[in-house]
Image: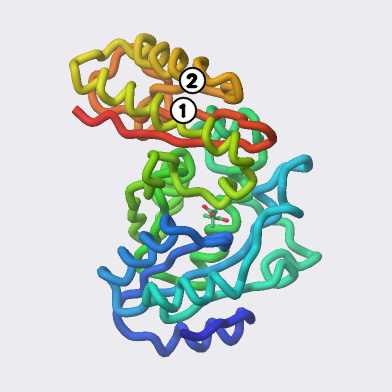
Amino acid sequence: MKIIESIPEFRSLRQNLNGSVGFVPTMGYLHAGHIALVQEARNQNSTVIASIFVNPTQFGPNEDLESYPRDLEADTVALKTAGTDYVYYPTVEDIYPPTFDTYIEVGSVTEPLEGRKRPTHFRGVATVVTKLFNIVQPHRAYFGQKDGQQVIVIKKMVNDLNIPIEIITVPTVRESDGLAMSSRNSYLSERERNAATIIYRSLNEVQSLFKNGQRDAEKLRETMRNVLTSEPLAKIEYISVADTDTLNELSVVENNAIASLAVQIGKTHLIDNVLLIQ
Ligand code: PAF
């Protein structure tokens, strides 16, 4: 496995690659969820490229950019073991030189849920993902279902801008008690970590209600809310049962839906979702 930092070096390497290229963009501090993306990319492509870049433009002014966990050494071991061929590890100056002044704004799917509290977040994600796509030029790119709105935003962008890359969504990888793997779980104290299990219990409950035939979206949301409020450490930020393409809130689930939630536990913002599939 080779680590490449400069854009010119990456471009010349890319020119010499034959066959399909699978790309896994990450912000590092990798966990089993990222490794599942690499494994899926490995199964489907001749070459697997991962990137590690903590993207400053997707963090708001009071967010955790400075304290975001980093561990390049452990990440390179994990990526190599999972079968990555190349790691693109750019500098902030390379991606955002002082003259940089172009951003990608995806429309209404960026507004609800995460977009409400973090109004510039998806502009940063869409911009960096477009730049990484242009540098890496993959055939397929892999994203985790855990960041459900991010997947919807990226699919919309790729479709609207005719970007010739297939977006593959990989199911959420969970700890044994159901907590979705996330780099931010490392912020949780032991007490908060225990409290965070309420997230999956709430999603499990909504999923079984749906399986039992409940299609009234407000009743589904109410169930999630009731479970979450039983945990005093979990401060609800949003609860949603929405269309899987537009993220419009539903009153009745006629087709499929995405049930999402965000809670604040201590200082940590945690998100998760499940798909409600007929
Ligand atoms: O999901 C992430 O880790 C990031 O949002 C991504 C897609 C790597 C863009 O910085």
First in sequence: mark 2 vs mark 1 = 1
Tell me the tag on residue 198: 1
Q: Indicate the quadrant where residue 71 lies.
A: bottom right
- Tell which of 182 and 63 is nearer to you: 182
Label 1, ligand 1: CB separation under 8 Å: no
Picture layout, residue 123 above or below residue 76: above
Q: Is residue 161 left or right of residue 19?
A: right
Q: Position of residue 150 (x, y in %)?
A: 48, 44
Amino acid marked by disc 2:
Leu
Task: Residue at 41% x, 90% y: name it.
Answer: 16
Provide the secondary structure element on which disc 1 rests: helix
Mark 2 lies on residue:
228
Position above or below: 222 against 44:
above
Q: Could you tell me if residue 247 is visible in this image?
A: yes
User: Could you give the CA–CA distance between mark 2 and mark 1, rounded to whole angstroms?
Assistant: 6 Å
Query: Where, by quadrant of the figure, is residue 74 drawn?
Result: bottom right
Looking at the rendered structure, the kind of residue marked 1 is Ile
The C terminus: image quadrant: top left
Q: Would residue 29 appear left or right of 277 to someone viewing this image?
A: right
